[in-house]
Image: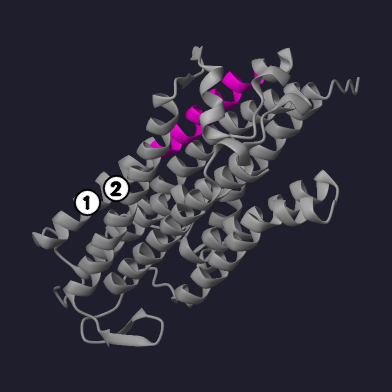
Amino acid sequence: MTQEAHEHPPYFLICGALAVLTIIEVYLPGLVEMWELSYFVNFWGLTFLAVVKATLVALFFMHLWFEKIRLKLFIMTPVVGTLLLLLALLVDALGITPF
Amino acid sequence: MSQTTTAKAGSSQDFGANRNKLGMWFFLCADAMMFAGLFGGYFMVRLANGEAWPIAQHYLNIPLTAVFTFDLIISSVTMVKAYESADTPDGEPIGVLPGLTVSNAPWVLRTFLGLTVLFGAAFIGFQYYEWSHFINYGLLPWDFHYEELTHIYHGLELGTLSGAQKAAFPLFFGCFYALTGFHGFHVTCGVIYNSVILINDCRGKYESDDEAAESIETAGLYWHFVDLVWILLFTFIYLV
């Protein structure tokens, strides 16, 4: 047993959830087109599904759920950094001049 | 596998993680920012081209990619089960399939680790097939053969393409090669990394259960990160 022993969550159940979410992701663009929904429904729906899947992998496969809060906060650094980078690029791409 | 455990010196208590694990997390945070830069560049190029951007579903094989996305997810499961096996004393029950439990033994860990390597290698094979498919048709950003696009998407009428749309195709494939290539390089390194761990375990190089579990946990973090990046890549390149 390791010094920082983890509980082991139900990995097969999480795998099943990831499989179902992947299937929904694959069919969502087709459904959006069929029901003539807005492109933004497609974009935000797929983004939401991707974020949920990534969170499941990070929390349970990478065992972040069981880690100390300090490590969790440390790992949030690239997440915040990525969002700031994308926000800065988006402002540039859309030609928004806040100042 | 040896039943004895030894105390590990130098564990960092501040983050509740040993040095190897913390070092891997440092690396993954830096790697995540590299991917963030690539994704940011992709979003910029895509936004700049607006409606002229090609519809990915017309040119990329979504069903096949979905199958290999699932392949990578399964490889993450086998990797984490390998860690669970290393973390469980020999003789204790461990689930190997839904509803199937066996007594933990060295073969369980090696089987799961071997499957992880196999699934990873299969993904590399898929990536090779996808790239060679496009390269054989001359769909390279610096030498783009537009007439070959009709072989991939039969509904395309080349004569109706605007100048902006023609300009967007090399950019689309350039982004595709950059992102999937960088990710594929990570997968290749991960397959080699996991293979080395498997070989070390088969040779009995790990002196204790702790040492084996620590190595597999650290390698597992890298492998799950690769899977996580692919989840985002599949969504934003192939589906959106």
Q: Provide the secondary structure element on which disc 2 rests.
A: helix
User: Where B127 sits versus B162, above or below?
Assistant: below
Residue B54 in the magenta stretch? The answer is: no
Main secondary structure of the magenta stretch? helix
Q: What stretch is highlighted in magenta?
A: B168-184
- The residue pinned by badge 2 equals B191
Residue B181 in the magenta stretch? The answer is: yes
User: Where B220 sits versus A79, above or below?
Assistant: below
Label 2 marks a residue whose chain is: B
Residue B88: name its quadrant: bottom left
In this rendering, position of residue A9 left or right of residue A51? left
Residue B37: name its quadrant: top right
Numbered label attached to residue B53: none
Camera sees residue B126: yes
* Residue kind at label 1, given as amino acid type: Ser
Q: Position of residue B70 (x, y in %)?
A: 47, 59
Label 1 marks a residue whose chain is: B
Question: How much space separates mark 1 and mark 2, taking CA atoms?
Answer: 6 Å
Q: Where is residue B22 in the image (x, y as percent from the top left)?
A: 42, 50
Split into 4 quadrants, where in the image is the N terminus of chain B?
Answer: bottom left
Near-viewer residue (B101 or B22) = B101
In this rendering, position of residue B91 left or right of residue A63? left
- The residue pinned by badge 1 equals B195
Residue found 78% across the figure and 23% down from its top: A93
